[in-house]
Amino acid sequence: MKQTLCIANQKGGVGKTTTSVHLAAGLARKGEKVLLIDLDAQNNASSVFPESKSDSAKDSFSLFSERAPLSEIIVRTRIEGLHLLPSSSKLTQIDVLLAGKMDGFFILKEALEPHSSDFDWVVIDCPPSLSLITMNAFVAATGVIVPLQVSKFSLDGIEAILEAKGNTVKRFNPGLKILGALLTLFQQRTTMSQTVVPMIEEHLRLFESKIPPSVAVEEAHLLNQSLYEYQPKNKATKAYLQFTEEVFSLG
Ligand SMILES: Nc1ncnc2c1ncn2[C@@H]1O[C@H](COP(=O)(O)OP(=O)(O)O)[C@@H](O)[C@H]1O
Ligand SMILES: [Mg+2]
């Protein structure tokens, strides 16, 4: 395993799922062995791979509730080299189910351990919260990537993420690093971006790649396709390919 990457931001709608899917698929297209883990009860990442649905009755809920081994949950996708751990709408129950359990933070990490030689990369799509599920991802991960949408609110959540990361490092996972923030839905020459970007950079390293807004992203989602399949030449597609190269070089 080169890296286990956690795509996290407790805000919804900042591009976590889009980034997780296109990073995972992008690395697989380079010939890497990749596991995409969908930990959001909304199932958005899993829905890009409808072909993987019927293969498995188990999902990430089975992992947390009954500690089902990953070998029983992981499914292939149509993209060569890309496997998926599908999500479950029942994931919202996990925080209550695991409350007070001593080892509740380590479930994902322990489940991944026997598979360290099966995958080069693990990409985890986190829910929009700093819940027990996200903490499981932080404990299992080597790196955190924070998708951010430039707005006057983008700074609000950064402190909470840095604090959660700091706590994880202190107690559970000393090696965890924040690899950087990825600007999504980014419009270069606006007053907003020119004002807010330097403020973000005071807290987080930014990836060079920035993802521009494109209707192709919504359209591809609607058609259950990745951008690489739907519009290989689109500006957002190219930006995600460039981002994939940046992350690959960190491996
Ligand atoms: N670069 C983009 N251009 C246009 N729409 C985007 C872009 N990135 C994400 N979106 C759309 O914004 C919404 C939120 O994105 P998503 O990746 O689901 O965020 P999150 O997982 O953080 O909630 C989705 O409807 C998605 O299609
Ligand atoms: Mg999402």
Image (cartoon, grey):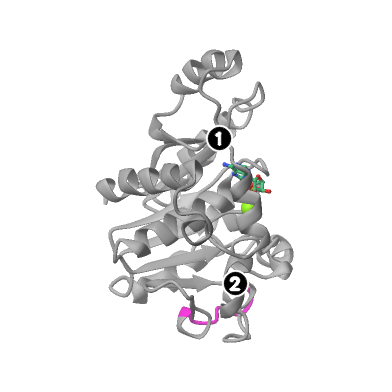
Q: CA distance from mark 1 to mark 2?
A: 26 Å
Residue 131 visible? no
- Quarter of the image where the N terminus is located: bottom left
Report the residue at 26% width, 52% height from top.
Answer: 251
Which residue position is annotated with label 1? 148
Task: Compare residues 167 and 124 and report the one nearer the observer.
Answer: 124
Q: Is residue 27 above or below residue 53?
A: above
Residue 166: assigned label: none
Is 67 contained in the magenta span?
yes
The disc labelled 1 sits on which kind of residue? Leu
Please tell me in which quadrant of the rendered image residue 15 appears: top right
Residue 60: assigned label: 2
Residue 89 image point, x, y percent: 73, 68
Task: Compare residues 74 and 134 and report the one nearer the observer.
Answer: 74
The disc labelled 2 sits on which kind of residue? Ser
Secondary element at image label 2 = helix
Mark 1 vs mark 2: which is more N-terminal?
Answer: 2
Q: Is residue 95 above or below residue 56?
A: above
Report the residue at 55% width, 78% height from top.
Answer: 67
Residue 178 image point, x, y percent: 41, 39
Q: Which residues are magenta?
A: 64-70
Does the Cβ of the disc 1 residue fall within 8 Å of ligand 1?
no
Is 78 contained in the magenta span?
no
